[in-house]
Image: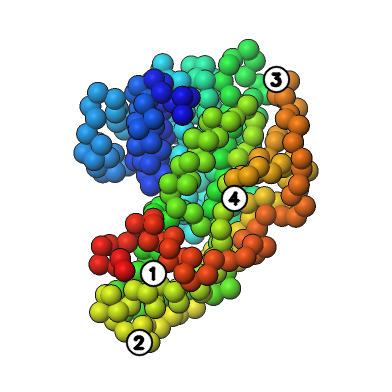
Amino acid sequence: MDTINGKQVLVTGGAGSIGSQITKRALDLGADTIRVLENNEAELFELQREIDDTNRLRTLLGDIRDRDRLRLALEGIDIVFHAAALKHVELNEYNPFEAVQTNVQGTQNLVRAALEEEVESFIAVSTDKASNPTSVMGATKLLSERLVIAANAYKGQRKTEFSCVRFGNVLGSSGSVVPLFYQQIKSGGPVTVTDPEMTRFLMPIEEAVDLVFSANERMGGGEVFVLKMPTFDVGTLAETMINAYGSAVGNQPDTIETEIIGPRPGERIHEKLISEDELQNTVEQSDMFIIYPEIDLDSYQRREETISLTSEYTSANEEPMSSDELLDMIERANVLPIEAHR
């Protein structure tokens, strides 16, 4: 993608599961320099060792809560990919002020710094939990989205374009349930299932990163890009993994039990990528939906596209993946140890 080639790029949270893949992809696409801003010292050091590109990779230890640090990090930057966030639903329920400090105030700090430096484009990574949120994490990510979109309205004559991407669970991310289930199977069980009827969106991490860069290519400023994603039932995933991997790790599948533990604080039974209230501003494309801004943006030219989505886009309304489809996705994502591969 020519929008990346030769550019100066900043990735916040760039040593995390999503951020590190964005960093690697941007390097592959020919970015001139990648600055990775990360507050996790150990992860930042490991990323530096893994990539080993001293000519283009710059590892910056810092936090998006620190406005002075952001000003320095953004000097001369063309493109910002904002992946830094507090993302653990249950922990955020018990620590809401911390979630606000990072996900809301931290995002606003970054937006202001981006405007001051007049970067070209700003893409923020959001979550399905931001659509009609029921958790602290979802509420703070919704506010984060609104801060990013609204920046287009008060940027004045600055050239910066601000947009968001929104997607569900990502295979290979730090919060993925697949590695957890695998470790529980390896230990002989039980496999802890919140609710077997619970449904979730799921995608490989490579496809999530594809969406991020596609959004940067297509954006006009003000959109929320939503990738079309397959869904799964949590109970089916647990059963499928027990049958597929139990014997491979030395445990007979019929001896591994599942334990229903109920939803954790802040969790909902079905996830939602597009709410009913967002339908009137949503258009469909072959690979994604685009939610256009509700607020008036003087510089924004709405494209002539058909609004074809007639109901909420939730994990409950989609046909869930079969066991074979789930296993195929897990295998292709390559997120389990080598002994698990069939």
Q: Which numbered disc flags the more N-terminal residue, 4 or 2? A: 4
Q: Is residue 136 visible?
A: no
Query: From the viewer's perspective, is residue 222 above or below residue 118?
Result: below
Instruction: Between label 4 and label 1, give the one nearer the viewer.
Output: 4
Around disc 3, counting alpha carbons within 10 Å, would you say few (fewer than 14), some (14 to 19), or many (20 or more)? few
In the displayed structure, would residue 321 be above or below residue 32?
Answer: below
Pointer 1 with pointer 2, Cβ within 8 A:
no
Question: In what element is the residue under mark 3?
Answer: loop
**Disc sitting over residue 228 in the figure:** 4
Left or right of residue 173, residue 168 in this image: right
- The answer to whether residue 303 of the structure is visible from this angle is yes
Between label 3 and label 4, give the one nearer the viewer. Answer: 4
Q: Earlier in the sequence, mark 4 or mark 1?
A: 1
Mark 3 or mark 4, which has the lower sequence index? 4
Q: Amino acid at mark 1?
A: Phe
Tell whether label 3 touches label 2 (CB within 8 Å). no
Q: Which residue is mark 1?
A: 181
| Residue receiving disc 3 | 299
Q: Which callout, 3 or 1, points at the residue further toward the start of the chain?
A: 1
Residue 249, quarter of picture: bottom left
Disc 3/disc 4 C-alpha distance (Å): 28 Å
Which residue shows up at 41% across the image and 23% down it? Answer: 5
Q: Residues within 10 Å of mark 1 (few under 14, many from 20)?
A: many
Name the residue: 64% across, 62% down: 318
Q: Which residue is mark 2?
A: 255
